Image (tube, rainbow, N blue to C red):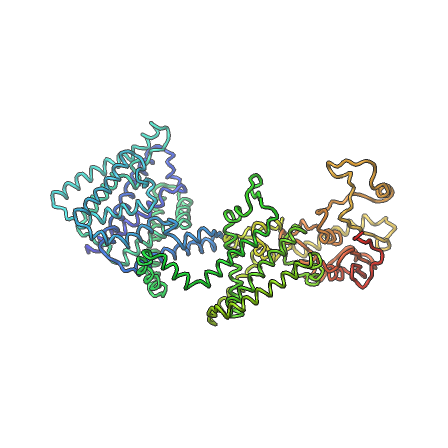
């Protein structure tokens, strides 16, 4: 019975500790320290009680961890539980909130080094180190405990953060409080000392409680604000530490939390309570459903109790799982060898590099290729991403875009693993991938210089134009590239013979092949706004930019930007859109058209219409800032006076001919399309079975393009548009009258 009551005390202290972690969140309106009244005084008293419970619980944990030398497996599984909770929080945030940040993933994988859960980190450190306190003499332990308590008292007297523990949310604070419990463990107080502790502990508690309740009034009176309202109601307050220590010393049955289930359950519950995402949700739920102060505190207590239940159950399940994993034994051996590794780290590092040099080399090459390919996207050594400040592009890339580089390196490394899985040769795979990535970067740079955009999936679809595109660059470039590629592959074959690397097992080859295909295949969802995959990809470092492909290539590099454009959404479906609605609108305009055309004598189909789209033609007198003498186009202007005429607003100038043609022939402005759709000729027309165009109003239509017709799939598209003839350089319909561009 006594054991049950004692354990109940632990659970009550845990409940109050969890409440103390949440109660003073800004979401709870009663904790804003904005009112100086009886309600504020009551809250201060509640705060004092919760703080004492948390301090007492921390001291008890310190005592328990000192008395039990836990195995390394136990320490490792405790750390794995923390990692599991962090990873679960990241996954929950993705599924529930559709949010993902790479920093959150790092926090989950490295919770201790990134100091995300200071209480849990302090607990794990205490597990590994507190048993060493037993090696100290009793006199030294007591001295250590007195020094720690004195540090809290000195900081309280001077009300200054002398030791860096004032906010109490750091590893040092939690370790100090737990060490107090470990240092004063084993003391059996005589009766007269017990009476002394009870008497003066009660006095200290009452004095501190009164001071805490009065401090809001004192703070407003002296400072005209609440800046010192919580001077005696914070975890690092020395008087409250004394009160909690008195309660700790008065407890006769001193080791109650020695059971692993109880001890681990407390740890698990505290971790769950401290997860930022869940904590915000817990507190927000309590804040949004109850307005009354008492009921709000009760609701917080109920939610805290539910978290404790989940924490105990989850801790039991996770520990059983992790204890059986091979990785646990692996890390246990690694921890055992860690001291020798630290003492002989040069030899250990050399051994590690010698053992894993193929993987390290592949990762290093992938990262180097990521840097090279991304740097090739800059045509200048300077870049001004903020619009006002200018940086060296390599400095900007290696600092502000490090996430993009790592993501690109991951993609290149996956390509390498795929090729290695297919050819079963390490150096051959490397010799195939390295020049391929470099050639890809150079090709993107050439297109950026000539067309101010990188290579897009729509360009790949123009396979008929590859031969003509090669004519646009100097002949030595493709020849040199081919020669270097052949030499590199030969070098790879040679190295596989002289310095062979064991081929991956069939199982690993299958895994890498499937993983790579799935990862790259997921790119069809990368630009689907608000999808879970796009959220993850953006969190990894992708910064989708479609309105300016040149900026997108510089931000993301040629590989990521290409994958961003794999799948396109033509346009978002408008609200209320349906076939019936469109037919109704068509009937309405049909009536309007009949009314307009009832008195017209001529028919459009009996006329001859000529479209002449010229990138170079415009009236220079209309260009702002340009002054010109005389009339450069007298005939055109005179012709406009005798016929129907006007001005055309073009969405492009000096380029984008294919898009101008599309908008002219189809009457659909590309501005209405999604930003992911860059070239309708290659991205929309080939997919549609019906393509209505203006020329279909006539019995006979001819198209003329004064260059290669294979670009932007014009040959196939003009056939779909219903042109009877399509003239272009190299077509079966010869263009006879043409200027010699060389003159």
Report x, y in % for residue 564.
58, 55
Instruction: Name the foreground residue: 151 vs 299.
Output: 151
> Residue 700 vs residue 420: left or right?
right
Q: How many numbered marks have been drawn onto this rendered protein structure?
A: 0
Report x, y in % for residue 427.
51, 66
Report x, y in % for residue 154.
26, 36
Instruction: Name the foreground residue: 582 vs 315.
Output: 315
Residue found farthest to the bottom: 506
Instruction: Name the foreground residue: 324 vs 47.
Output: 324
Residue under the point 39% across and 61% down: 352
Residue 7: tell me if it is visible. no
Residue 103: tell me if it is visible. yes
Q: Is residue 23 above or below residue 95?
A: above
> Residue 491 vs residue 672: left or right?
left
Report x, y in % for residue 274.
37, 49
Instruction: Name the foreground residue: 330 vs 352.
Output: 352
Quarter holding the N terminus?
bottom left
């Amino acid at each position: 019975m006594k054991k049950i009551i004692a354990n109940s005390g632990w659970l009550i202290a845990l409940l109050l500790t969890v409440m103390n972690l949440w109660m003073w969140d800004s979401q709870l309106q009663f904790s804003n320290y904005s009112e100086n009244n009886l309600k504020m005084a009551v809250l201060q008293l509640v705060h004092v009680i919760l703080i004492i419970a948390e301090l007492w619980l921390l001291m008890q944990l310190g005592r328990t961890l000192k008395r039990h030398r836990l195995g390394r497996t136990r320490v490792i599984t405790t750390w794995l539980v923390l990692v599991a909770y962090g990873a679960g929080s990241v996954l929950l945030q993705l599924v529930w909130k559709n949010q993902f940040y790479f920093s959150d993933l790092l926090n989950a994988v490295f919770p201790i080094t990134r100091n995300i859960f200071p209480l849990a980190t302090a607990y794990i450190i205490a597990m590994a180190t507190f048993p060493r306190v037993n090696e100290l003499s009793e006199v030294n332990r007591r001295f250590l405990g007195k020094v720690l308590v004195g540090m809290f008292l000195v900081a309280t007297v001077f009300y200054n953060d002398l030791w860096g523990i004032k906010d109490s949310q750091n590893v040092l604070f939690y370790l100090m409080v737990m060490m107090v419990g470990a240092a004063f463990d084993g003391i059996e107080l005589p009766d007269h000392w017990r009476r002394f502790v009870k008497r003066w502990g009660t006095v200290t508690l009452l004095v501190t409680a009164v001071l805490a309740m009065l401090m809001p009034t004192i703070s407003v009176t002296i400072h005209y604000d609440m800046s010192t309202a919580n001077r005696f109601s914070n975890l690092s307050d020395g008087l409250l530490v004394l009160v909690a220590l008195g309660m700790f010393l008065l407890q006769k049955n001193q080791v109650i939390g020695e059971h692993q289930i109880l001890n681990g359950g407390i740890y698990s519950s505290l971790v769950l309570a401290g997860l930022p995402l869940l904590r915000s949700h817990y507190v927000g739920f309590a804040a949004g459903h109850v307005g009354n102060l008492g009921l709000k505190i009760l609701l917080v207590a109920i939610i805290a109790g539910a978290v404790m239940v989940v924490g105990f159950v989850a801790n039991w399940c996770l520990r059983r799982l992790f204890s059986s994993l091979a990785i646990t034994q692996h890390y246990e051996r690694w921890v055992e060898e860690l001291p020798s590794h630290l003492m002989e780290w040069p030899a250990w590092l050399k051994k590690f590099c010698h053992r894993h040099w193929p993987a390290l080399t592949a990762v290093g090459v992938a990262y180097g290729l990521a840097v090279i390919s991304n740097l090739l996207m800059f045509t200048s050594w300077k870049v001004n991403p903020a619009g006002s400040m200018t940086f060296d592009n390599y400095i900007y890339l290696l600092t502000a875009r490090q996430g993009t580089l790592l993501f690109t390196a991951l993609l290149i490394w996956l390509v390498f693993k795929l090729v290695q899985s297919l050819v079963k040769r390490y150096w051959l795979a490397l010799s195939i991938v390295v020049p391929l990535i470099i050639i890809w970067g150079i090709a993107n740079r050439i297109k950026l210089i000539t067309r101010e955009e990188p290579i897009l999936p729509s360009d790949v679809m123009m396979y008929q134009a590859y031969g003509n595109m090669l004519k646009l660059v100097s002949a030595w470039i493709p020849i040199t590239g081919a020669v270097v590629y052949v030499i590199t592959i030969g070098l790879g074959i040679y190295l596989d013979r002289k310095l062979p690397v064991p081929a991956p097992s069939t199982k690993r080859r299958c895994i890498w092949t499937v993983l790579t295909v799935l990862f790259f295949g997921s790119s069809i969802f990368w630009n689907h706004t608000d999808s879970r995959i796009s959220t993850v990809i953006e969190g990894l470092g992708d910064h989708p930019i479609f309105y300016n492909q040149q900026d997108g290539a510089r931000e993301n590099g040629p590989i990521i930007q290409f994958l961003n454009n794999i799948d396109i959404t033509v346009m978002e479906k408008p609200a209320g859109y349906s076939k019936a609605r469109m037919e109704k609108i068509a009937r309405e305009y049909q009536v309007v058209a009949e009314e307009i055309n009832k008195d017209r004598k001529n028919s459009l189909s009996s006329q001859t219409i000529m479209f002449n789209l010229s990138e170079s033609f415009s009236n220079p007198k209309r260009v702002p800032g340009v002054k010109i003498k005389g009339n450069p186009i007298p005939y055109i202007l005179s012709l406009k006076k005798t016929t129907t005429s006007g001005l055309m607003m073009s969405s492009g100038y000096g380029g984008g001919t294919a898009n101008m043609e599309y908008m002219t022939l189809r009457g659909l402005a590309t501005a209405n399309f999604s930003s992911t759709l860059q070239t309708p000729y290659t991205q929309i027309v080939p997919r549609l079975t019906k393509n209505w165009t203006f020329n279909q109003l006539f019995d006979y239509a001819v198209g003329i393009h004064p260059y290669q017709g294979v670009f932007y799939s014009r040959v196939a598209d003009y056939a779909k548009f219903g042109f009877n003839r399509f003239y272009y350089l190299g077509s079966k319909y010869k263009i006879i009258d043409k200027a010699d561009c060389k003159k």
